[in-house]
Image (cartoon, rainbow, N blue to C red):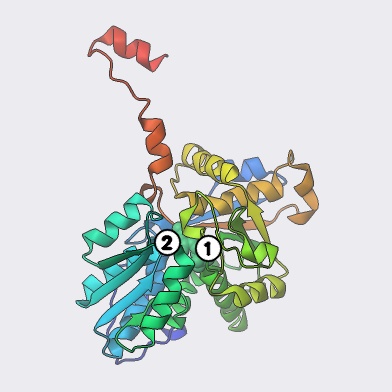
Amino acid sequence: MIERYREFLPISPATPIISLGEGSTPLIYSRRLSERIGRGCDVFVKNEGVNPTGSFKDRGMTVAVSKAMERGTRALICASTGNTSASAAAYAARAGISCVVILPAGKIATGKLLQAFAYGAKIVAVNGNFDDALRIVRELGETGDFTIVNSINPDRIAGQKTAAFEIVDELGDAPDFHLLPVGNAGNITAYWAGYREYFARERSTKLPSMLGFQAAGAAPIFHDYIIDKPETIASAIRIGNPASWKQARAAIVESRGAIDVVSDEKILAAQSWLAQHEGIFVEPASAASIAGVFKWCDSDDAAYSFQKIPEGSRIVCTVTGHGLKDPDVIIRRMKELKPVAATMTDVRRAIGM
Ligand SMILES: *Cc1c(COP(=O)(O)O)cnc(C)c1O
């Protein structure tokens, strides 16, 4: 990824490139999603779940870890709701340095915690939420023993911009609307920076409106106050005090976009819908962008009827992470599976068709 967009990244000939083949993810034209939205809109899904560790965090991590190696770092540190730690642990392993991850105890999705263990990170669980973990990481970062690879690290944001470049390169121009989930708000900040940079270099003729979606129980930017105990099934966006709050506000205002909320129920419905109608299985947080496009465009949602997204718009929804990372909700459904006898009659009856 760094090689593809080297001229836009803070990379010099002296930077050792630490890569796992991240980026260049599929931008999928979604026919059924476009049909459901209707009014001649074209909806594309940018599937970031196919990155090496299964989330967009790898785009930022390849740049952050390459720069850290250039500066001679011996250890990375991060706080994480799961995907940052999975990514940091993998890129640290690739670079041959150690990685410390500080996690809110009991709040990390199964697959993500498993990844941190598999890649050999040093894992510390704290009794607190993500915001507590990040506070501790910021303090440890000041000792100089570690490089912080949370999205407060500007190299992370620089790397994550490349997703916007890829979209413009593939569509031939910027979309009209870009929808994505918002947690710490690093990604909405990065996309907006990427779109602006490409526009300034005349690689696109327009800028999209950025629409960010927070979970209803973890929506500090939407409400404009810190949420002490954020709650949502979408653990990757369970954030009460976003690190890039100001930048996200700027992106929304400058792009004439908006920040909105979606309920957990709508998030899970969107996750199922996308898997079953488009074949794209994402984690719950990622489905916030899909729940968002439904909320803004569905004709049966009277409060959000037609005028907001005009007819014929080109819409891109980023889905941020792979569904296998956070299987707990679906595992409950799997438990209903009961074996039947290995006979034609019993199997036919079980199929029910
Ligand atoms: C990190 C993450 C988010 C939130 O991104 P921010 O940059 O913190 O707003 C959303 N979805 C997934 C899957 C993530 O890993």
**On the picture, is 100 further left or further right than 333?**
left
Can residue 260 be spotted in the picture? yes
Residue linked to disc 2: 81
Q: Residue furthest front?
A: 127
Q: Inspect the image, locate mark 2, and give the three-letter code of the amino acid beneath it.
A: Thr
- Identify the residue at image location x=74%, y=38%: 300
Which percent across, then down, holds residue 188?
57, 69
Q: Tag on residue 239?
A: 1
Left or right: residue 85 compared with residue 240: left
Indicate yes or no: mark 1 CB to ligand 1 under 8 Å. Answer: yes
Mark pair 1, 2: CA separation: 9 Å
Instruction: Determine the secondary structure under disc 1.
Output: loop
**In the depicted structure, whether residue 341 falls above or below residue 192:** above
Quadrant of residue 211 within the rendered picture:
bottom right
Label 2 packing within 10 angstroms: few (<14), some (14-19), many (20+): many
Which quadrant of the view contains residue 219? bottom right
Q: Secondary structure at mark 2?
A: loop
Image spot of residue 154 (x, y percent)? 46, 82
Along the horizontal axis of the image, is 26 left or right of 188? left
Between 83 and 312, which is closer to the camera in this rendering? 83
Tell which of 99 and 271 is nearer to you. 99
Q: Amino acid at mark 1?
A: Ile
Q: Quadrant of the C terminus?
A: top left
Task: Tell me: 63 left or right of 197.
Answer: left
Q: Residue at 41% across / 14% down in the picture?
A: 352
- Taking the spot 47% from the left edge, 58% from the top edge, the residue there is 236
Q: Position of residue 66 (x, y in %)?
A: 31, 81
> What residue sits 74% from the left and 42% below the top?
301
**For the view shown, which residue lies furthest in the top direction?**
345
Label 2 beta carbon less than 8 Å to ligand 1: yes
Sequence-wise, which precedes: disc 1 or disc 2?
Answer: 2
